[in-house]
Amino acid sequence: MTIEDSADSAPLDHVLVLAPYRRDAEYLRQLLGEYEIQVEICSSADEIDAALAGSPGVLVATHEALTPPVLAAVAAHLSHQPAWSELPIVVLLDRASQSVRIRAELARVWPRARQLFYQRPVTPVELVSGVQSALLARLRQRDVRDHLAREVELRRELNHRVKNILASVISIFEMTLRGGVSLDQFAEDFRGRLGALAKVHSAVFHAAEEAVPIAEIVDLTFEPYRLPGKGRIISEGPEVLMTREAGTTLALCLHELATNAIKYGALSSPNGQVSFLWSISESDVPELSVRWVESGGPQVIEPTRAGYGTRYLRSALASIFGQKPLIAFEAAGLVCEARGPLSRMAAVISPTASEV
């Protein structure tokens, strides 16, 4: 069993007990067990490495357990802790021990530990309170770890999004420059396309309504890449009013696909074309299917490893549709397909169609 934090009911780690003599180990197991704290006992130095590999939340050691092999094993474990970790160690000292010298020595050999000392005999309430506090401190350390990991992931995602937006702006600039007949016309077209790109972020990603038509998502996302008289991007499908969350995620996925097509795929070639089609199955449980197909661009070579964009698409589309998408690096062009229950993402359905 485990002790649980009252705030979020997250389970805490077990306690590792190093107590080789007398009945200390069993006493500690029984005492802590009464408070639903899980205990693992290590009775010899030969077992310490394997016990520490189990990542205990707190280490409780009696004075007589602190032999040179144990000190060295714990020191080695502490030296390999991640940056967020500071293992709490509760040391039970004999009344006759030289506590000042022991504290100084342990501080030297275990510099990356949060050390608590108790003079025996210690009252059960005091000891349990100390162990519980150490376990809670350990949980807070792991909360910090999770926050740091999330911050790193958000920074990576932000960096990826900024690079994609810059790539889109450069592509729009070059596309507009090729079709411009005058400086004034170029400025007007370029300004309009940048404005269309901004609409994706302001009108779709931060929509005030609770739902948004899939056709509007498509129009806003693809508008910056349209060229007069050229059907480079074609879309078609029944009108589906998507929830705001699903619509925002779909817009991000389409933006990711379009950016990839600009950098490496069909939209990097003057004659390249992209089609994005969606449909609803006629069945007892209607499904929404979407299909992105590129053609007319450079020959596609499947990458040796999935980049951030591909990983994001798989994760984001799976979150919308409830199952993994198919992403195929066909030689003629990238293909991306996804399907799932309409009820996961749609609010209203009507039979009209839209085409960009």
Image (tube, rainbow, N blue to C red):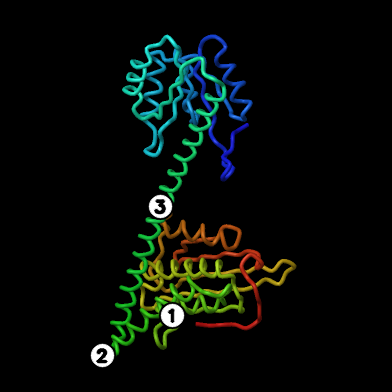
For mark 1, give the secondary structure.
Answer: helix
> Which amino acid type is shown beneath numbered disc 3?
Glu
The residue at 42%/85% (across/down) is 230
Q: Which residue is mark 1?
A: 223
The residue at 36%/68% (across/down) is 263
Rounded to the nearest angstrom, the CA distance separating label 1 from label 2 is 22 Å
Q: Does label 1 or label 2 sit earlier along the sequence?
A: 2
Query: Looking at the picture, does residue 309 appear above or below residue 267?
Result: above
The residue at 37%/66% (across/down) is 164
Q: Nearer the viewer, residue 106 or 201?
A: 106
> Which amino acid type is shown beneath numbered disc 1?
Glu
Query: Looking at the picture, does residue 230 appear above or below residue 305?
Result: below
Query: Looking at the picture, does residue 234 appear above or below residue 243?
Result: below
Q: Which residue is mark 2?
A: 182
> Which amino acid type is shown beneath numbered disc 2?
Ser
For mark 2, give the secondary structure.
Answer: loop
For mark 3, give the secondary structure.
Answer: helix
Q: Does label 2 or label 3 sit earlier along the sequence?
A: 3
Q: Does label 1 or label 3 sit earlier along the sequence?
A: 3
Q: Nearer the viewer, residue 130 or 166?
A: 130
Q: Which residue is mark 3?
A: 151
Residue 7 in which image quadrant? top right
Q: Position of residue 292 (x, y in %)?
A: 51, 70
Rounded to the nearest angstrom, the CA distance separating label 1 from label 3 is 32 Å
Rounded to the nearest angstrom, the CA distance separating label 2 from label 3 is 46 Å
